Amino acid sequence: FIAAITLAIVATLETLLNLEAVDKLDPEKRVSPPNRELLAQGSGNIISGLLGGLPLTSVIVRSSVNIATGGQTRISCFIHGVFLLTTVMFFPALLNTIPLATLAAILIVTGFKLAGIPLFKQMWKSGRNQFVPFVITIIAIVLTDLLIGLLVGMGVAIFFILPASLKLPARRVVEKGSDGDILKIELVNRVSFLNRASLMKTLHEVPNGTQLVIDASSTVYIDPDIINSITDFEKQTAPARDLKLSLVGFKDQQ
């Protein structure tokens, strides 16, 4: 029972982390529905378990390869599954001839591309509150396993940001402009990484083509993760959705 719960938690965390990474890699900047993904994964793993199979989870390696080769719809994932099933059913001996060292090398290279030296430099520049939990999480995962490492990282991160405000990160204000209504999102005094999900939900709910202003004039602290998310939204999501976005008061937060 404990093993089943552990596998379910690990699979859920890995899938959610993969969804966030894939959404950033997606050229069309679509937002994946996590509830649908987890429902499909859970249903599939239940059926797999009843048939004597192993549990599966979404991983960044397959997803990034799909994106890199031009996959844009669910068909790419379906075709991948068909090829994999065909190979396992009709060519199992051929699969066994692939050296494990080769597969390990592919995983190492892919992982290094996703979390290379530039990422460490970026986390170092983000300050102690970001770098220390980041390094401790990596060390904990290497010395223990993925689940324990993530729990340790979450505990350390919470310790660093506990004094930060947990209030709603923003309020919406509609103002009149010469070219129509302007939606203004005013950030609160402090915005921690715990506010990221609710803030991004607010931003993704903005209708396409809206004149949008994100105002941080009254904000004294913004977590670097929030700044990175807003920057990604400004450079990628906003142009794709024809949002006329303006950032106010972020100069001192960079």
Image (cartoon, helix red, strand yellow):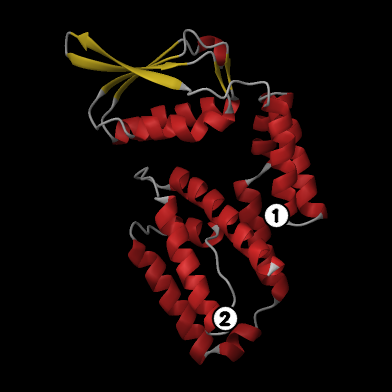
Q: Quadrant of the N terminus?
A: bottom right
> Mark 1 — residue?
147
- Residue that carries the numbered disc 2 in the rendered image: 53
- Report which quarter residue 54 is drawn in: bottom right
Residue drawn at 64 percent across, 63 percent down: 5
Quadrant of residue 159 in the image?
Answer: top right
Gap between marks 1 and 2, in whole Å?
A: 22 Å
Q: Nearer the viewer, residue 136 or 2?
A: 2
Tags 1 and 2 in contact by the CB under 8 Å rule?
Answer: no
The image position of residue 143, as x and y in percent, is 83, 53
**Residue, far left:** 179
Tell me which residue sits at (53%, 82%) in the image: 50
Q: Is residue 56 above or below residue 109?
A: below
Residue 72's disc number: none
In the image, is 8 to the left or to the right of 83? right
N-terminal label among 1 and 2: 2
Residue 133 in the image: x percent, y percent?
Answer: 73, 35
Location of the C terminus by quadrant is top right
Q: Which amino acid type corresponds to the residue marked 2 in the rendered image?
A: Gly
Residue 147 placed where, x, y %?
70, 54
Element type where label 2 sits in the image: loop
Q: Is residue 235 left or right of residue 244?
A: right
Local packing at callout 1 (Cα closer than 10 Å; few below 14, some 14-19, many 20+) is some
Mark 2 Cα shell of 10 Å, populated few (<14), some (14-19), many (≥20): few
Q: Residue at x 17, y 8 (%)?
A: 178
* Residue 39 visible to an observer of this rendering: yes
Q: Residue furthest right?
A: 143
